[in-house]
């Protein structure tokens, strides 16, 4: 590819050198101008293309080349195209050689403009006849030579001239486009302004925008002198309006100023509405008669010397384009219309605006009416289509058949009437008239049937209206609003849903009326006109027609009742759903709206009336539904006879079971009580069962009826699906449950009389009072339940809750009147009468006796309730401890008085009678009875077992083994582990076999051969040393028991402290089959033990020096000494934590003798825990080891505490001196006086495990 123009002439100013442009109309040139990706891809140039290029090069030199052609594209040749360069490039080479030969010498100065023009002008072409034919390629080469032979300045001049022509053409196109756009805008504005003056402006256009004038616009009159000259001068002082633009005078009916304000071809005023002128909009109206000079303005004529610069042959466009005249005419027309508007009086201007505004308003109204009409028509069509779709094909067919029957009946009626008129005899006339009457009834019945069938579609319409309201409430519930926004939205919806509920309720009432009055609006056949005619006259179709109409009458009555009931059921469901939505909306509404609707104001009264109306409608619905249960049952029987049969059998079976229970229940209760009483000892669950049976016997009758009714209702169907059964269940349940509660309260009161002193029998008055109160409560509860079921918890529910307290006033006055003598009697029986009781007893006369009696009754009731709660709580350990603390505090207050009293301790014989180390098995029969049964059952098995009985010192482990031995018999052997441990125990085991010297395998074999045997080892904690390798002896014993096997069972007793140590040391590896922990003794059991010891000692201690505070007297019965004794036993139980040995020691420390020989009880001195807490850690470690060992020797304590022997010896000496421990056998142990205090402190210091 070679660009000759660039190589020779250089780039054209303002154009890129490497961008060839071709004629868009020349495919060959375009193809040659596109740079190929490969040389072979360039197609050869055609002859037409070469000839066209040659012509365009010459036109470029002459200045007439089409401005759309890029000149650079004309000089691009393809070296691969032989048509352009010739064979082997001969033509190109010839061209280049000719250029070298013809190249002139460089001139000293550039040629003048005139000479340049003469040189660039082409030679006159010779006549065609004389021209020698040349090929297109040669012609193209000649054209190239002509251009290339020009000097550089000439070539540059040629290209610059072409660029100027292109720029001028582009500018002209842009100007023309602007003129055309402005022409369209001006014409549109003029047309609209003319239409506005004529009163026909498009309603969507604002007339004020048409009258806006931008004087700063270069194309407007403000900056256009030519257009300004067309406007008239301002009016003179003597003339109030511009010349030729005087407005028409009012009422003259002539054209007036409007005529002078227009041109010859202009518009004249026509005296139309508002004085709006009309015009034809011709262009000639802008040329004359408006005070301008000359003809059309020439504001858009081209000015300047652009045409002079271009040669005549350059083809420059004309100075004034054709659109310029049209634009001037349009502008002149617009200015004329503006002047016409300015010439109008202000009233006419306002009239034009008013006319346009009125037309817009009328158009909007007409559009709205049309839209409403279209919407109504569309809705009617849609409802008709939906009605047909809802009815179904069968219903539509029924309606069609009924309408066809009505049309046939009408035709037959008309025919019968015609026959009656043409009848020749009176009988024929009567028969014809009867036929006409019957056909008329048939027509009415057919239309009535069609109407009834159409009414089925009302169900969907009613339900859709209700569903829309309910959906709004649901959307509000689930929406994002909350707080004040939610309340505001709920308030806005409330009135709408209440209105819809009222309308639905009215429709339901109407449908229920139709159900009751079904068939009353159907025309009856009645007595015929032919009844007086002889029987022998042929009546034709009359008889058959009358029978058909009578059957149709019954059928229509049934159909109307079915349709009305179907609609009533749907409406009732809608009423219930809308009411539920209303109540939900009321919960979301503002407090002011809620208070207004549920209060006693006008809105509240209105809401109560609405709810009463709904209750009446609900009751009417349920009353009408009751007779339909027979049809429902028959329908179920026909659909599922087996299911109905099963249901009847279930009902009969429930009735038979109820009758059997009523007859046999008294005997069953007696048997159950006897069976529970036979259990010894009586477990806790048996006691609770006896109490439950006692109450059930007194309240069972209403509960039995309630269970039977519940069972029958649920066998009959789901109560929630049958509103009538739900209402029945509410009534019956409130009555029966209320009676059961009355009987239960009476039973509770009767049972509590066991804990009161002997008083007058008030059982009849009590049950009467409970019935009075209960019936009022039942009535209020039943009213609330029925109201909530039928209308929800709305205004009536709120009113009942707000006013039910009013009933309490007469009830309280009546009960106080009946109970006043009993209240006075109960007050006088209070042992310690406080100020209130004394004041109440003194108010027996006057008007104050009723309120005082009411206050006294409340006092007695509260006192009784408090005592009842104390009795219920007294069985709990925490309560007992609190009561013991109160007793101890009260006794401590009186300690100063006791110190002044002359008393001394009991003698040694009496003191030793309460020895803690001695327990009688007969007194512990009811202690750990369940645990004894467990161990007995385990050792009775033939397989070898290993059981452990755990309890702290003094809990009766040895006594437990004695009781177990009494249960098992002779095969139960009890051994006491000596202080030396296993070495002393093995000879005792061998002695059981008959040889004390047997050991190891011989011993185990001998034990195995002894057959069934139970070996009990007491005080097995002596086999445990709380030291390193301190469990060796226990492990040897366990290995011995394992090797013995056979039928030998083992039972060991162990102290609680040693067991906790063993459990922590071995954990899960402890292989005892059963671990029994002895329970703590109760205060009653401790009291029985102490009374038995007092009997053995031959003393009867007095508790007169101790005073029990009133708050620890929960039972409220018995003498003062009995209450004090029970309180002191509770104090001992709390101090000893249920340990009988500790309690016995504390009690003997409480016994004193007066000078007169009377044995009295005073508070024992409890050791101070602070004294133990102040000890050093070595001393505490020694005390802990003594507790764990139970019986400790000095070397054992040294091994257990890892303390130096001297420290242990000093610690023992210190503890002996303080009385913490005492010598026992070959060792020491903790004294009973300090046992509970020391163990408590060690547990607080986490040196011992606390009992669970």
Image: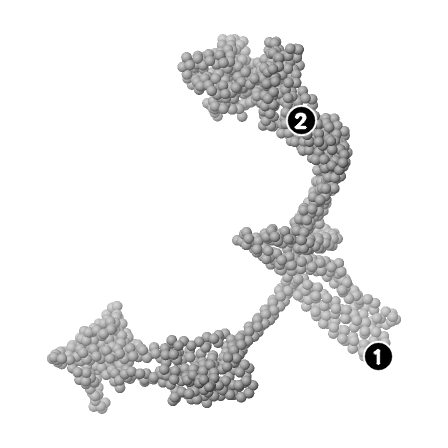
* Residue 1178 seen in the figure: yes
Identified at 29% across, 79% down, the residue is 168
Could you tell me if residue 700 is visible in this image? Answer: no
Residue, disc 2: 1115
Quarter of the image holding residue 867? Answer: top right
Q: Earlier in the sequence, mark 2 or mark 1?
A: 1
Q: In this rendering, which labeled residue sits more in front, label 2 or label 1?
A: 2
Q: Nearer the viewer, residue 29 or 724?
A: 724
Q: Looking at the image, is 296 positioned above or below residue 1210?
A: below
- Residue pointed to by mark 1: 424
Circle 1 packing at 10 Å, graded few (<14), some (14-19), many (20+), is few
On the picture, is 236 further left or further right than 792? Answer: left
Q: Is residue 850 above or below residue 341?
A: above
Residue 450 percent coordinates (x, y): 70, 66
- Percent position (x, y) of residue 716? 70, 46
Q: Could you tell me if the residues under marks 2 and 1 are in contact, i.e. CB atoms within 8 Å?
A: no
- Residue at the spot 62% in from the left edge and 12% down from the top edge: 902
Q: Which quarter shows the N terminus? A: bottom left
Side of 955 relative to 132 (left or right): right
């Amino acid at each position: 590819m070679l660009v000759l123009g660039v190589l020779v002439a250089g780039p054209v100013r303002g154009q890129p050198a490497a961008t060839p442009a071709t004629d868009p109309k020349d495919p060959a040139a375009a193809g040659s101008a596109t740079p190929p990706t490969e040389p072979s891809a360039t197609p050869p140039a055609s002859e037409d293309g070469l000839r066209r290029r040659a012509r365009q090069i010459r036109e470029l030199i002459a200045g007439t080349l089409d401005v759309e052609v890029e000149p650079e594209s004309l000089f691009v040749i393809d070296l691969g195209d032989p048509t352009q360069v010739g064979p082997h490039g001969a033509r190109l080479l010839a061209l280049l050689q000719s250029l070298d030969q013809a190249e002139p010498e460089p001139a000293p100065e550039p040629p003048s403009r005139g000479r340049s023009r003469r040189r660039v002008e082409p030679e006159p072409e010779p006549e065609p006849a004389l021209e020698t034919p040349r090929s297109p390629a040669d012609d193209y080469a000649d054209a190239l030579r002509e251009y290339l032979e020009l000097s550089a300045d000439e070539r540059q001049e040629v290209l610059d001239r072409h660029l100027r022509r292109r720029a001028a053409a582009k500018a002209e196109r842009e100007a023309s486009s602007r003129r055309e756009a402005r022409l369209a805008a001006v014409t549109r504005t003029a047309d609209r302004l003319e239409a506005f003056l004529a009163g026909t402006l498009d309603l969507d256009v604002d007339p004020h925008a048409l009258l806006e004038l931008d004087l700063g616009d270069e194309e407007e009159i403000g900056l256009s002198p030519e257009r300004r000259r067309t406007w008239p001068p301002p009016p003179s002082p003597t003339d109030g309006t511009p010349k030729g633009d005087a407005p028409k005078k009012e009422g003259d009916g002539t054209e007036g100023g409007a005529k002078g304000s227009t041109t010859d071809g202009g518009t004249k005023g026509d005296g139309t509405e508002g004085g709006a002128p009309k015009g034809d909009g011709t262009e000639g109206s802008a040329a004359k008669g408006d005070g301008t000079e000359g003809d059309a303005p020439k504001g858009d004529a081209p000015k300047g010397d652009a045409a002079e610069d271009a040669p005549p042959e350059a083809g420059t466009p004309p100075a004034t384009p054709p659109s310029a005249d049209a634009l001037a005419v349009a502008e002149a027309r617009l200015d004329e219309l503006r002047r016409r508007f300015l010439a109008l009086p202000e009233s006419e201007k306002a009239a034009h605006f008013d006319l346009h505004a009125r037309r817009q308003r009328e158009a909007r109204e007409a559009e709205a009416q049309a839209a409403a009409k279209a919407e109504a028509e569309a809705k009617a069509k849609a409802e008709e289509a939906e009605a047909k779709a809802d009815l179904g094909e069968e219903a539509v067919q029924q309606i069609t058949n009924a309408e066809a029957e009505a049309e046939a009946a009408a035709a037959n009626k008309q025919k019968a009437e015609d026959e009656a008129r043409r009848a020749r005899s009176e009988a024929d006339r009567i028969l014809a008239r009867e036929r006409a009457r019957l056909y008329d009834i048939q027509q009415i019945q057919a239309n009535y049937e069609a109407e009834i069938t159409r009414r089925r579609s009302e169900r969907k319409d009613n339900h859709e209206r209700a569903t829309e309201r309910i959906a709004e409430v649901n959307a509000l519930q689930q929406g994002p609003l909350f707080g004040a926004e939610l309340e505001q939205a709920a308030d806005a919806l409330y009135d709408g849903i209440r209105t819809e509920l009222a309308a639905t309720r009215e429709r339901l009432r109407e449908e229920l009326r139709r159900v009751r009055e079904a068939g009353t609006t159907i025309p009856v056949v009645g007595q015929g006109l032919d009844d007086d005619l002889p029987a022998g006259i042929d009546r034709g179709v009359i008889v058959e027609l009358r029978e058909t109409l009578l059957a149709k009458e019954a059928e229509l009555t049934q159909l109307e009742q079915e349709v009305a009931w179907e609609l009533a059921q749907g409406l009732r469901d809608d009423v219930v759903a809308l009411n539920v939505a209303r109540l939900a909306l009321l919960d979301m509404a503002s407090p002011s709206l809620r208070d207004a609707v549920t209060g006693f104001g006008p809105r509240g009264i209105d809401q109560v009336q609405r709810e009463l109306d709904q209750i009446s409608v609900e009751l009417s619905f349920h009353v009408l539904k009751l007779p339909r249960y027979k049809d429902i049952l028959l329908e179920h029987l026909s659909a599922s006879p087996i299911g109905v049969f099963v249901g009847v059998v279930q009902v009969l079976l429930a009735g038979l079971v109820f009758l059997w229970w009523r007859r046999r229940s008294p005997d069953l209760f007696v048997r159950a009580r006897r069976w529970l009483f036979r259990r010894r000892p009586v477990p806790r669950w048996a006691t609770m069962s006896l109490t439950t049976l006692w109450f059930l016997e007194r309240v069972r009758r209403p509960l039995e009826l309630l269970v039977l009714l519940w069972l029958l209702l649920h066998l009959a169907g789901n109560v929630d699906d049958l509103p009538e059964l739900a209402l029945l269940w509410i009534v019956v349940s409130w009555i029966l449950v209320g009676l059961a509660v009355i009987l239960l309260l009476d039973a509770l009161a009767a049972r509590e009389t066991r804990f009161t002193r002997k008083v007058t029998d008030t059982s009849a008055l009590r049950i009467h009072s409970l019935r009075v109160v209960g019936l009022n409560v039942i009535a209020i509860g039943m009213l609330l339940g029925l109201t909530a079921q039928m209308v929800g918890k709305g205004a009536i529910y709120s009113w009942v809750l707000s006013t039910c307290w009013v009933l309490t006033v007469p009830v309280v006055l009546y009960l106080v009147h009946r109970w006043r003598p009993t209240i006075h009697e109960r007050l006088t029986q209070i042992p310690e009468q406080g100020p209130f009781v004394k004041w109440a007893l003194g108010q027996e006369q006057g008007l104050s006796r009723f309120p005082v009696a009411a206050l006294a009754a409340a006092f007695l009731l509260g006192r009784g309730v408090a005592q009842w709660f104390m009795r219920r709580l007294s069985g709990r350990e925490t309560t007992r401890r609190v009561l013991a603390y109160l007793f101890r505090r009260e006794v401590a207050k009186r300690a100063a008085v006791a110190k002044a009293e002359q008393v001394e301790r009991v003698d040694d014989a009496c003191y030793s009678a309460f020895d803690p180390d001695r327990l009688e098995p007969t007194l512990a029969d009811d202690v750990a009875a369940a645990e004894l049964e467990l161990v007995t059952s385990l050792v009775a098995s033939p397989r070898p077992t290993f059981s452990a009985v755990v309890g702290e010192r003094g809990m009766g482990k040895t006594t437990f083994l004695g009781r177990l031995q009494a249960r098992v018999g002779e095969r139960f052997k009890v051994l006491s582990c000596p202080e030396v441990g296993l070495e002393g125990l093995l000879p005792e085991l061998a002695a059981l076999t008959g040889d004390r010297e047997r050991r190891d395998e011989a011993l185990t074999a001998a034990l195995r051969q002894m057959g069934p045997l139970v070996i009990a080892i007491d005080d097995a904690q002596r086999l445990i040393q709380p030291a390193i390798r301190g469990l060796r002896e226990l492990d040897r014993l366990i290995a011995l028991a394992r090797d013995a096997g056979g039928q030998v069972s083992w039972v060991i007793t162990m102290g609680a402290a040693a067991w906790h140590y063993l459990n922590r040391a071995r954990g899960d590896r402890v292989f005892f089959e059963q671990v029994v922990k002895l329970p703590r003794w109760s205060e009653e059991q401790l009291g029985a033990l102490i009374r038995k010891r007092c009997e053995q000692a031959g003393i009867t201690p007095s508790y007169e020096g101790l005073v029990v505070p009133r708050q620890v007297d929960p039972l409220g019965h018995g003498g003062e000494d009995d209450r004090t004794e029970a309180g002191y036993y509770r104090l001992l139980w709390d101090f000893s934590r249920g340990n009988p040995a500790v309690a016995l020691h504390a009690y003997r420390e409480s016994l004193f003798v007066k000078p007169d020989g009377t044995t009295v009880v005073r508070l024992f001195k409890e050791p101070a825990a602070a004294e133990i807490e102040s000890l050093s850690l070595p001393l505490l470690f020694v005390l802990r080891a003594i507790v764990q060992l139970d019986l400790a020797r000095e070397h054992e304590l040294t091994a257990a505490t890892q303390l130096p022997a001297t420290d242990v010896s000093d610690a023992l000496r210190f503890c002996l001196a303080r009385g913490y421990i005492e010598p026992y056998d070959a060792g020491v142990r903790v004294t009973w006086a300090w046992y509970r205090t020391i163990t408590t402190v060690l547990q607080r210091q986490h040196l011992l495990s606390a009992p669970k």
